[in-house]
Amino acid sequence: MAPSFSTSNDLIRGEPRSPQHVPRLTRRVSGFLPQEIKTIDASIPLRSRELWEKNSIQKFNEENGFAKKFVGHVETSLARSMYNCDELAAYEATSLSVRDNLLIDWNRTQQKITTREPKRVYYLSLEFLMGRALDNALINMSSNGKCGDREGGTSREFVKKGLDDLGFNLETVLKREPDAGLGNGGLGRLAACFVDSMATKNIPAWGYGLRYEYGIFAQKIINGYQVETPDYWLNSGNPWEIERTEIQVPITFYGYVDRANGDTTTLSASQWVGGERVLAVAHDFPVPGFKTNTVNNLRLWKAKPTTEFDFAKFNSGDYKNSVDQQQRAESITAVLYPNDNFTEGKELRLKQQYFWCAASLHDIVRRFKKSKRPWREFPDKIAIQLNDTHPTLAIVELQRILVDLEKLDWHEAWDIVTHTFAYTNHTVMQEALEKWPINLFGNLLPRHLEIIFDVNWFFLQEVHKKFPKDTEILRNVSIIEETSPERQVRMAFLAVIGSHHVNGVAELHSQLIRTTIFKDFAKVFGNKKFTNVTNGITPRRWLKQANPKLAALIGEAISDPEQNYLLNMSKLTTLAEKASDYEFQIKWNSVKEQNKLRLADYIKELNGGVEVINREHIRNTLFDIQVKRMHEYKRQQMNIFGVIYRYFCMKDMLNAGKTIEEVAVKYPRKVSIFGGKSAAGYYMAKLVIRLINSVAEVINTDRDIQDLLKVFFIPDYNVSKAEIIIPASDLSEHISTAGTEGSGTSNMKFVMNGGLIIGTVDGANIEITREIGEDNIFLFGHLSESVEDLRFKHQYNHVPLPSSLERVLNGLDDFTEFKGEFKPLTDSIKHQGDYYIVSDDFDSYIATHHLVDETFHHSKHEWIKKSILSVANIGFFSSDRCIDEYASTIWNVEPLSS
Ligand SMILES: *Cc1c(COP(=O)(O)O)cnc(C)c1O
């Protein structure tokens, strides 16, 4: 059936819906009604509570207690013995033991929240790039006696000792854990840092996401090309998750809106009869805070078939088909879409989004209903944060629940909705903005499309009242984009209209969303709705866990051996007093060297045990690192072109008769390290990976330049690799085309680990510069204000390339046996308008690298001083600061007191 929807133009001109606008549909034989939301109460009788409490399990808090737990789990949970306990089993038993401690606090935290009824936060994110859980749990559990630790030792220390006594080594046991790679890059990692900070700050908060069977693919490099292999991360089970088979939410898709029983308007309770139903099963992951008893929850949904049975099909003899269809349910949460900053308009993706939003909303509403409060108090008790537009359907789903199931008046419902949600935008790039063709959308979610049309209708009326003479603005802000061949739902616009706040992720980015993609909304709503919360990272994982030696040295230097500064990173400022202290500089540099050696060891292991970085020279070798998702806007191509240019210049000097010593003066020792995945279908990004590997092959085997320059591509960049790579950087590259990077968060990770940055004036680089001082960062390139003009110039004039870049582009065939293999990279710059303005920034990029070399090799103490001063002033970028800002300016929530 093809329901006749009003166009947005009709909606502007026309009357509110009249009965003839509403399609009359006949009732079909089979179909599913979305279920009413019920609450559960299964308390045990009062007389049993004392017995219960007496028998509650206790936390272990020393190595013997741990050993007892560990052996217990090996023998019962794993059903193994001391004769067949391998390292994987040791990892599992350790995790289950540690998890027991966390769950005691988890239960207490959740009980406290239930009885006190504070306002809660729900963080909806389609991605949580968590990495490994065990080491993080051991670090966060440590609280000097408060949280299961005995005096004078941390949980991590006594678990290490306990494992040692049992014949295992903690460090190797930790490596048995697969990464939870349920995200692509920055957006997913941000969500992971935020849940850590929310627990640490005692905010009553839950994360909601999907439990993908396959996380982000594992990247293999074969002949220099990226090959994707499935990440079946649950292969050996997952000791961190608790499957809650008691929490199963029925989710409906397809079908039609039944108006056979006299409904005359889409604005009041309507009957959506679904054509397909699956179940969402909750899987919970404890999220411990650092040095606090708060343990929050991350709830991930898995899809499974219902036990409902299509008797119509069965009776017609189609048993096999009716079972097959049920089985397809599981495909909804099978795989994470591997795109970073790019949308794929596939129906399955929209299905994932609705499945997740509907399950989460059902859960949130059920919990609220238990409190028996009136609906108008919903926004006083609940704040929902939307991580990008992926969960925008939650806005529509809440409106549907309130109107169709709870029978609230449309406007009353919409008022509740818009006081509940807030939306974080992550990008201004067109290709990343979600749009859904209305046919695809209306087929999967017919009632939701009606609701969107009605939301749009009321919104456009309001806009029309405000700007009666401006017809252009109605077209510009309509949720429905009138494109041929088909109209589309603009999810970002829906998110803006349905939220009370919209924030960008760095100051420049937040300013850009107000002046570009949402400029007309800023006119309608005023600037106050649009705010900024600059991203941050958790210093527990990105300093203490990744770089324990630096964390300890900092603690020692600022007289905080317990490292309480990790809870208040502004305490680092006193480190500045030591920036010029020679002795301290030596210690500081020694930590960096050890981390560089650790990475060199890892690279050696990757190379089958063959030494590739000359260890004797490691202190005089600049480690120059760019690790992040592969993207044209992040400009890894410019980096590798710079490496090629350097190589060509070195060869020129040798050919002109200079000695290797003379070359070394101009081009001192450097290793250029790359890492990052490309989306599977992103041709240009994959070609850059191939170029980097091809260049590495040539340069690393060129004996003429000896060891002065090396290039590596580290395969399968992920969170646990990042923890090894980032502490080893002298320099890292954050060189996006100005105005394209939302914030960047790895820039913060690198600086927190004592690395300096070469970067463009983009994203959070700008605020990093403000915080650490412009003497301590190497900025270059055109500003975002100039980018539009530069692009225009490339489109309409023939602009000659700088000779440096010309040389590189003409020489790309030196690195491949397939002539012209890299031509698409050249063409994009020479003939396709150089959208990322590589040619305009190239010479200043090269010049800035010379300044870097100069400082690193000829003013080492200056360099170390910059490094110390940077760390001293990086405190602002703790994700704890982000959570404070969200809590006070957007969510209006308070921490739970103890
Ligand atoms: C921090 C992080 C990112 C984000 O890096 P950017 O350079 O900010 O894009 C991506 N992937 C992983 C594994 C990370 O840890």
Image (cartoon, rainbow, N blue to C red):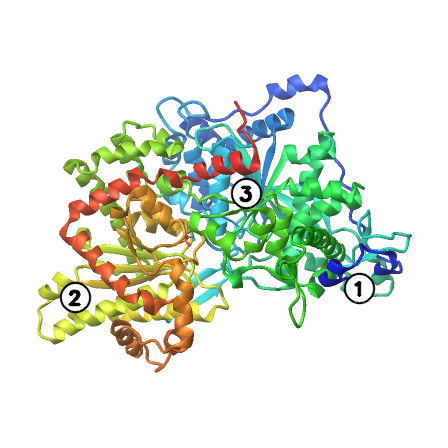
Task: Report the residue marked by disc 1.
Answer: 4
In this rendering, which labeled residue sits more in front, label 1 or label 2? 1
* Crowd around label 3: few <14 · some 14–19 · many ≥20 (10 Å): few
Mark 2: secondary structure: loop
> What separation in Å lies between label 1 and label 2 (alpha carbons)?
72 Å
Q: Which of 447 and 515 is in front in this view?
A: 515
x and y percent of residue 210 in the render?
Answer: 59, 50
Mark 3: secondary structure: helix
Q: Residue 846 carries which label?
A: none
Does the image show residue 83?
A: no
In this rendering, which labeled residue sits more in front, label 3 or label 1? 3
Point 65% across, 43% down: residue: 418
The mark that comes first in sequence, 1 or 2, is: 1
Quadrant, the N terminus: bottom right
Mark 1: secondary structure: loop
Task: Report the residue marked by disc 2.
Answer: 706
Mark 2: amino acid = Gln
x and y percent of residue 41 in the render?
Answer: 73, 30
* Crowd around label 1: few <14 · some 14–19 · many ≥20 (10 Å): few
> Which quadrant of the structure image shows residue 715?
bottom left
Task: Report the residue marked by disc 3.
Answer: 528
Does the image show residue 511?
A: yes
Q: Nearer the viewer, residue 517 or 588?
A: 517
Mark 3: amino acid = Lys
User: In the drawing, does residue 866 fall left or right of residue 759?
Assistant: left
User: In the drawing, does residue 30 fall left or right of residue 657?
Assistant: right
The mark that comes first in sequence, 3 or 1, is: 1
Is 211 drawn above or below residue 565 in the view shown? below
Q: Which of 245 and 442 is in front in this view?
A: 442
Q: Nearer the viewer, residue 621 or 776?
A: 776
Asked if the residue at tag 1 contacts the one at tag 3, i.e. Cβ–Cβ closer than 8 Å, the answer is no
